[in-house]
Amino acid sequence: MTQARLMDGTALARRIVEDTARRAADLTARTGTTPCLATVLVGADPASVTYVRMKQNRSRKAGIASRHVELPAATTTEDLVGTLEELSADPAVHGILLQHPMGAHIDERAAFEAIAPEKDVDGVTFASFATMSFGLPGFVSCTPGGILRLLDAYDVDPSGKRAVVVGRSAILGKPAGMLLLARDATVTYCHSRTTDLSAVVREADIVVAAVGRPQLIKGQDIKPGAVVIDAGYNPGNIGDVDFDSAVERASLITPVPGGVGPMTIATLLEQTVDAATRQLGA
């Protein structure tokens, strides 16, 4: 049996970032204002610190200014909300990224909702979820948005297809399902309480694994010819799909790393320039 073709998120993300850099340079030349992304980090979780630094480096390469706000781990929800409200009111900041996860003592939803919808370039607010769900102009959650761009790049039309999303987080699983539904897929959400997960996944033409459990989805669970999107990232560069067995049955599959991850950052940068363009009336 022919092995699945790899969906190269790294190459596609590079093209998106190159286009974003051209747009950022043009916007800066026309308005005298450089698009600016503010990143907010609470505490010093090593993975989060590395991730934020990577986003800052990618921002600079794309011609996007970066402002970083680092808060102590003991920061209260009230103080974090205040910081985000200040950034939302600052006309020099066009997009805001609140790095998660945060400490358990912080009301994450209250923090997200302190981000002005027009600066929610990570697509984490109620307003962004509503616009995604209703197909209205706005910002998509970056990882689900990147997944849809990958499907488009590989000519996968979700219309009429059975899509199974494994995971129901507010910024990955749920919006991924809504974006697929907007493309006329028939969407099933699975989660930790789903009975006989394997049986549900075996019916899927498109599988989105977004649950954060290493190699949960096995090759035997994949319908022959299905498209497999692995949005999981676990220690040791391991996804939520058992790649070695799934690649023998799928038609298309994303590797980990190099699949969904680069698309997430590319979508964030693209949406930051979109936000700046709208705010500057350009």
Image: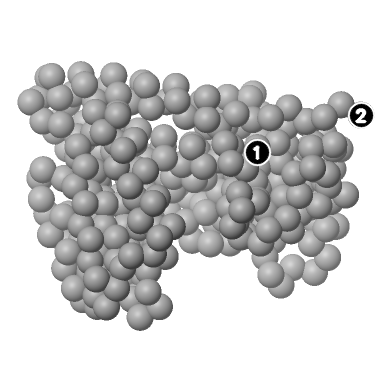
Given residues 250 and 155, the one toward you in this image is 250
Q: Position of residue 174 (x, y in %)?
A: 54, 56
| Other residues around mark 1 within 10 Å, as few (<14) / some (14–19) / many (≥20) | many
Q: Position of residue 261 (x, y in %)?
A: 51, 42
Height in image: 154 above or below 236? above
Q: Residue at x 30, y 29 (%)?
A: 61
- The reply to whether discs 2 and 1 touch (Cβ–Cβ < 8 Å) is no
Q: Position of residue 144 (x, y in %)?
A: 52, 45
Q: Residue at x 10, y 30 (%)?
A: 33
Whether residue 164 can be seen here: no
> Which quadrant of the figure contains the C terminus?
top left
Q: Which badge, 2 or 1, is on the more N-terminal residue? A: 2
Instruction: Give the side of residue 145 with respect to residue 79, left or right.
Output: right
The numbered disc on residue 255 is 1
| Other residues around mark 2 within 10 Å, as few (<14) / some (14–19) / many (≥20) | few
Query: Farthest residue toward the left?
Result: 32
> Which quadrant of the figure contains the N terminus?
top right
Instruction: Give the side of residue 175 with respect to residue 35, left or right.
Output: right
